[in-house]
Image (spheres, rainbow, N blue to C red):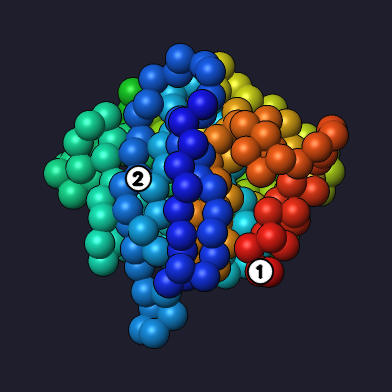
Amino acid sequence: MLQISVLCKEGMWPYQVLQNTSGRDAPVYLNVENISYSYGNVRALRNVSFSANLGEVTGIIGANGAGKTTAMRIITRYLVPQSGDVFIDGRSIRHWRNEDFPVSYIPDEPVFYEELTLLEHLHFVKALYPKNLQDIEGLIGRFEFYDHINKVPSSLSKGNRQKLMIALALLREYQILIADEPFTGLDPNQIYNLKNILSEQRKMGKAVLLSTHLLDMIDNLCDRYVILHKGYLLAAGTKEDIQAAFDIEGAASLEAIYLEITKRMEK
C-alpha cells in the first residue's frame, strides 16, 4: 500500500491520502493531476489528484459543494482547470480532438433539444456515432420508453428525462463513462437497473466514474472511491484500504467511513 501524509488548509488539517492502493492490476487510463479551480473567491478544487482504471467503477463522493461536479466538468472539458491537468491514455485532454475524445457524460442537469422527441434524440445521437453497437430498440425496451417515444423532453417526468440522458450516453463511442449524480429522480427499480448498467460497463472494460452524495447507493458497487471535502482530496483507494489507513475498525459502511473521516477533518 502506498500511503502519503499531507497537510491541507494551510497546515490546519493533517490527513492521509491513498493513491493507487488497489491490489488489482487494472490498467490506469485516466489520471487527474493536481487540478484546481475557483469560482470567483470560492475555491472548488485544491490540487486534487486521482486516477481511474479500465474495467473498474470509481465513485467520487462527498457532500454538496465538495467539488464533485467541478471535477467531472474538468474531465469532460466543460471547464478548464486553472492549474494541473488531466490525462487520458497518457495524453492531455487539451490535445484530444473532439471527434476522438473517448468520454461519454451524463451531466447532473439533463440537456436536450426541446424540438426533438425522445425517439428522435436516440436516432440523432446514434447517427453521430455509427460504430456504437447499442441497439435503439433494445434501449427503448430496457428503459421502458415505449409509451414515451413520441414525447418531447418537457413532457417527460424527471425520472424519464434522467433515463433518456443515460440512454444517450450509452449510444456514444467512449472508453470512459462519467455519471454526475445519476440516481437523481430515479425510482428504486430504475436505480437497480442503472447499477446493473454500470456493472455491465465495467465488464466491457470501460472506466466508469460516478459522483454522488447518496453513499448508500454505491456502497460495494465501486472498486475504489475518491473522497472530496470542501475542495480537498481526503482519500482515494479501495474501501478497505481507506478504512485501514484511517484505523476505522469493524465492518463499517461507506457512509460510516466517510462520516468518521470528515468528522476528524473538522476537529
Q: Position of residue 141 (x, y in %)?
A: 68, 30
Say what amino acid the circle numbered 2 marks: Val
Please report the residue visible at 25 percent of the width from the left and 62 percent of the height from the top: 83
* First along the sequence among labels 1 and 2: 2
Which amino acid, mark 1? Glu
* 132 over 7 or under it: above or below: above
The answer to whether the residues at label 1 and label 2 have Cβ atoms under 8 Å apart is: no
Mark 2 neighbour class, 10 Å CA radius: few under 14, some 14 to 19, many 20 or more: many
Q: Nearer the viewer, residue 7 or 256?
A: 7
The numbered dot on residue 266 is 1
In which quadrant of the rendered view does residue 151 lie? bottom right
Residue 16 visible from this viewpoint: yes
Q: Residues within 10 Å of mark 1 (few under 14, many from 20)?
A: few
Residue at image mark 2: 32
Query: Dot 2 lies on which element?
Result: strand
Residue under the image location 62 percent in, 57 percent down: 62
Residue depicted at x 27% and y 40%: 87
**How far from the left and from the top, in percent, is residue 218?**
71, 40
